[in-house]
């Protein structure tokens, strides 16, 4: 399913030309305040990430979307969606992730994309639940997940020397 839509957003499979917007958004310190890995250092890092996402799309038929406003087609405002990940103690799980340009924060887009991902997974994926991994101090992201019906089910020691990340689960059935 290469395209998916919500009320205000177009969600589509990323292509190679998206690397420019990917670096603009993922290379911005403001969008990485709670990300222990920090912003992308240069566009080659963004290209590696994009290639990983595209490989995931090829292997599984879904993945991280490039997100555009229907009202302003052709301008990517963020990236987000679903991906398989193997997490210690949790096995293989499908995670919901997202990162938007600060220019569009506060419009409810993360929640709208997340609901689209839940609807997509309910219709098309043979999994019982989706997961979200969040740094414990990242109130904004926790709020998005809680609005979407995710609840805390445990922790994950993924950042040495720092408090564990929270693991949230959204049952689908
Ligand atoms: C965290 C992040 C995704 C939140 O994005 P967002 O789009 O602003 O989040 P939301 O969808 O919750 O929208 C925020 C507010 O928009 C408001 N809003 C405005 N118009 C709205 C509308 N038409 N519909 C719904 N909500 C609307 C909501 O009230 C909501 O605030 P509230 O929860 O206090 O009610 C964003 O800050 C981001 O990309 N950060 C950097 C990357 C990052 O940290 N990712 C997560 C890593 S775990």
Image (cartoon, rainbow, N blue to C red):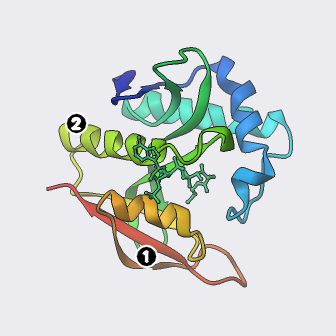
Between tags 2 and 1, which lies in front?
A: 2
Query: Quick check: can you spot residue 92?
Result: no
Q: Quadrant of residue 100?
A: top right
Circle 2 Cα neighbour tier, 10 Å, few/some/many (<14 / 14–19 / ≥20): few
Which residue is the site of mark 2?
124
Q: Is residue 165 above or below residue 97?
A: below
Q: Is residue 114 visible?
A: yes
Please give left or right for residue 48 compared with residue 130 in the image.
right
Residue at coordinates 67% horizontally, 44% vertically from top-left? 102
Residue 18 against residue 49 in the figure, above or below: above
Which residue extends farthest right?
42
Please report contact status of discs 2 and 1: CB closer than 8 Å, yes or no: no
C-alpha gap between disc 2 and disc 1: 26 Å
> SS at mark 2?
helix
Q: Is residue 46 left or right of residue 53?
A: right
The quadrant of the image that shows the C terminus is bottom left
Q: Quadrant of residue 82?
A: top left
Numbered-mark total: 2
Left or right for 17, reference 28:
left
Q: Which mark is residue 89?
A: 1
* Residue at position x 20%, y 44% in the image: 122
Location of the N terminus (image quadrant): top left
Quarter residue 2 falls in: top left
Q: Residue at x 37, y 65 (%)?
A: 146
**Label 1 crowd bin: few (<14), some (14–19), many (20+), radius 10 Å:** few
């Amino acid at each position: 399913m290469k395209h998916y839509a919500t009320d205000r957003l177009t969600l589509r499979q990323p292509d190679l030309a998206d690397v420019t917007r990917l670096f603009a958004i993922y290379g911005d310190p403001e969008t990485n305040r709670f990300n222990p890995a920090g912003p992308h250092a240069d566009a080659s890092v963004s290209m590696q990430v994009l290639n990983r996402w595209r490989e995931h799309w090829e292997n599984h038929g879904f993945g991280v979307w490039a997100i555009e406003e229907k009202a302003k087609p052709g301008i990517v405002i963020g990236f987000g969606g679903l991906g398989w990940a193997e997490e210690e103690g949790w096995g293989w799980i499908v995670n919901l992730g997202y990162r938007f340009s600060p220019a569009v924060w506060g419009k409810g887009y993360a929640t709208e994309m997340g609901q689209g991902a839940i609807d997509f997974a309910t219709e098309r994926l043979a999994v019982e639940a989706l997961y979200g991994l969040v740094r414990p101090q990242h109130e904004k992201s926790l709020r998005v997940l809680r609005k979407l019906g995710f609840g805390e089910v445990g922790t994950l020691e993924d950042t040495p020397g720092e408090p564990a990340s929270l693991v949230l689960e959204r049952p689908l059935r």
